[in-house]
Image (spheres, helix red, strand yellow):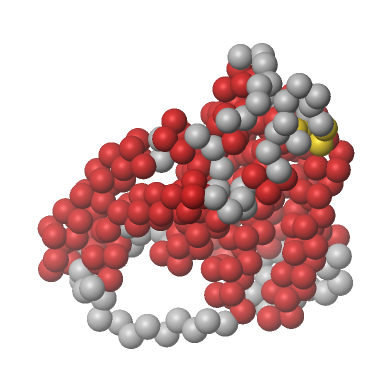
Amino acid sequence: MYLSLSLFQAVLWAIFTPLVFIGCITFFKTSKLSRDDPKEILRRIKIIGVVTVLWPALLYSLFSSEVETAEGPSVWHWIGIGITIKNYAAILSSSAVTLVLFIGPLYQMAFDEAESTTEFDLKALRAYVFAPIYEEVIFRSTLITALIAGGAGFYGAVMLSSLIFGVSHLYHLVEAFECTGRMRQQKVMQAAMQAAYTTVFGFYVGYIFVATGSLYAVILVHAFCNFMGLPDVGFMNEGHYGYAYKRSISAAYIIGIVLFIVLLSLSLNPDLHQSWHYTLINQLSGNEISKLN
């Protein structure tokens, strides 16, 4: 099976993706409950779950085609959930690369004397389970696949999808404009920072998806990054619990970044994994569709 889209159709799909994803949250909202209210969390889990199933199904029903001269892979390989050795290797590679990036924050945790009060409540379930699954299916597996099939290329697909992913998080501005004064300014800054962070993060997981073709890999990376959050560099300030260990913590951060750069080019090299998405990009760049080996 192949997906047959023009670049124009792929870009239209990219534009409509965040509108559908965000629209389903707001259109069916019947109360003014906050996004962290348990009832609102459950409502969103249900409604976005339906969209997460229907949106990729719509893509494949509209644009799938059989090519007489070549036989493409199954829909499971397009989605990124094929049960293959390559997929398992992708999970290990992406997990290892992401883990070393967080060597600094993980080492820093050893000096945190505060008692952990984290509970696996609905907010945690949303952040560590449902959000990674839903967002990776919609913005990576479906959106990037459509862009690649439309001829956007490797970095074109990754960059456009990451920008759309980041901008889609600006819907939190709606909550900001419901506030006034300093609270509104704080909410606006938070939304802007989240949009910037998710754009960069979207580029990273987008690269992983195209390089490896594994939906499992990006879901696990997404869940882990949500758990770790942004690094707390406050240890450089006197009075912080980690200030006395700032040199060793700083060294751990540097080691993690260096190892990340090295391993990224080795373990997540697209030529190493030879994913179906990467193979298709090479085929389209050569203006031919040949049988996948």
Foreground of the two, 235 or 87: 87
Task: Examine the rendered structure and indicate whether residue 59 appears above or below residue 151.
Answer: below
x%, y% of residue 237?
22, 62
Residue 156 visible, this angle: no
Task: Specify whether 23 is left or right of 194.
Answer: right
Which residue is painted at 30% across and 82% down in the image?
114
Task: Specify whether 247 is left or right of 219.
Answer: left
For the C terminus, the image quarter is: top right
x%, y% of residue 288?
67, 16
Which residue is painted at 24% across and 43% down in the image?
258
Task: Examine the rendered structure and indicate whether residue 87 appears above or below residue 30.
Answer: above
Task: Examine the rendered structure and indicate whether residue 24 appears above or below residue 122.
Answer: above
x%, y% of residue 276?
59, 36
Which residue is painted at 25% across and 66% down in the image?
108
For the N terminus, the image quarter is: top right
Foreground of the two, 60 or 103: 60
x%, y% of residue 143?
69, 41
Foreground of the two, 242 or 177: 242
Foreground of the two, 69 or 129: 69
Task: Examine the rendered structure and indicate whether residue 187 appears above or below residue 94.
Answer: below
Residue furthest to the top in view is: 287
